[in-house]
Image: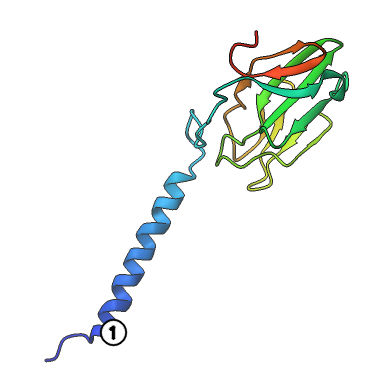
Amino acid sequence: MPGPSSAARRTVLKGAALAGTAGLGVAACSTDSKLGHAKDPGLSEAVDLGTATAVPVGGAKLFREQRLVVSCPAEGQYKAFRAQCTHAGCGLDKVEGIEGNCPCHGSRFDVTTGKALVGPATVPLPEIPVTVKGGNLIAGPGTV
């Protein structure tokens, strides 16, 4: 009795390989992690974000290029967070009120606390030190 054809064997092997790859993707995107899946590259040095008055009191501003979001809960008080989703590492694309939006999978974050409001992200945004020097916002290591 002849064995299965080479073409049939290849089809079975391709299917098995794809199933294995899909399984890895599901495992990598699991939302059960307490640490988050995105690697935070952090800031290696302080960055000047420009004038502090660009962040409205009671509001927030997204600094896309630096991947930071800064809120101003009261005049002269600022909080900064990494504007990178803790689920898969996508950059936040907009801030509406006090909510930052991740365009990749729909996660939303409170940009005044960093807290994940809507999943799949469950881990808060990492806080970044920020201060005002000479009227400008300076964020990153050694700023506070």
Residues 93 and 35: in front is 93
Numbered disc 1: secondary structure: helix
Q: Residue furthest left?
A: 1
Residue occupying the point 73% across, 42% down:
93
Residue occupying the point 57% across, 25% down:
43
Callout 1: 10 Å neighbours few (<14), some, many (20+)? few
Q: Residue furthest top?
A: 144
Residue 87 in percent (x, y) is at 56, 38
What's the residue type where badge 1 is placed?
Answer: Ala
Residue assigned mark 1: 7
Residue occupying the point 76% across, 12% down:
132
Q: Is residue 8 above or below residue 54?
A: below
Assign the C terminus to one quadrant of the image. Answer: top right
Looking at the picture, the colour scheme in use is rainbow
Residue 143 in percent (x, y) is at 65, 11
Q: Quadrant of residue 96?
A: top right
* Residue 135 appears in the picture as rendered: yes
Q: Quadrant of residue 130?
A: top right
Residue 108 in percent (x, y) is at 70, 36
Residues 53 and 24: in front is 53
Q: Is residue 124 above or below residue 138?
A: below
Q: Is residue 25 above or below residue 55?
A: below
Drawn side of residue 86 relative to residue 113, left or right: left
Drawn side of residue 52 relative to residue 104, left or right: right
Q: Residue furthest front?
A: 134
Drawn side of residue 18 relative to residue 97, left or right: left
